[in-house]
Amino acid sequence: MKKTVTKNMEDNFEMKEEYDFSSGVRGRFYAPQKKAATIRFDDDIILYFKKLASEKKVGYQTLMNSALRDYIHQHISG
């Protein structure tokens, strides 16, 4: 029965000629998908991120991900 209701709602939807996205927020509903990967780092790299993570009270893998993302953005943009 729910499929019928959903189908009827879709049938009544009409596209407007234009939509105003001027106050929209880019990436508001975007959530990047995490993938598991096996990767090897030197001990000193892991110790650095674990120490920094404990100071900032976040996960060390989160910090490593952020550092890699910053590196990528710096090298793509400029």
Image (cartoon, grey):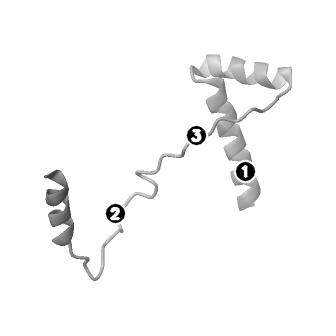
Tag 1: amino acid = Ile
Rounded to the nearest angstrom, the CA distance separating label 1 from label 3 is 17 Å
Identify the residue at horizontal 75%, vertical 60% (top origin): 78
Rounded to the nearest angstrom, the CA distance separating label 3 from label 2 is 29 Å
Along the polypeptide, which appears first: circle 1 or circle 3? 3
Residue 23, label in figure? 2
Answer whether labels 2 and 1 touch (C-beta < 8 Å). Answer: no
Please determine whether, in this image, residue 36 is positioned above or below residue 49. below
Identify the residue at horizontal 34%, vertical 63% (top origin): 23
| 73 vs 62, nearest the viewer | 62
Identify the residue at horizontal 84%, vertical 20% (top origin): 43
Residue 9 lies, in percent from the top left, at: 16, 64
- Is label 1 or label 3 in front? 3
Along the polypeptide, which appears first: circle 3 or circle 2? 2
Residue 34, label in figure? 3
Tag 2: amino acid = Ser
Along the polypeptide, which appears first: circle 2 or circle 1? 2
User: Which residue in the protein does label 1 denote?
Assistant: 72
Residue 42 lies, in percent from the top left, at: 86, 25
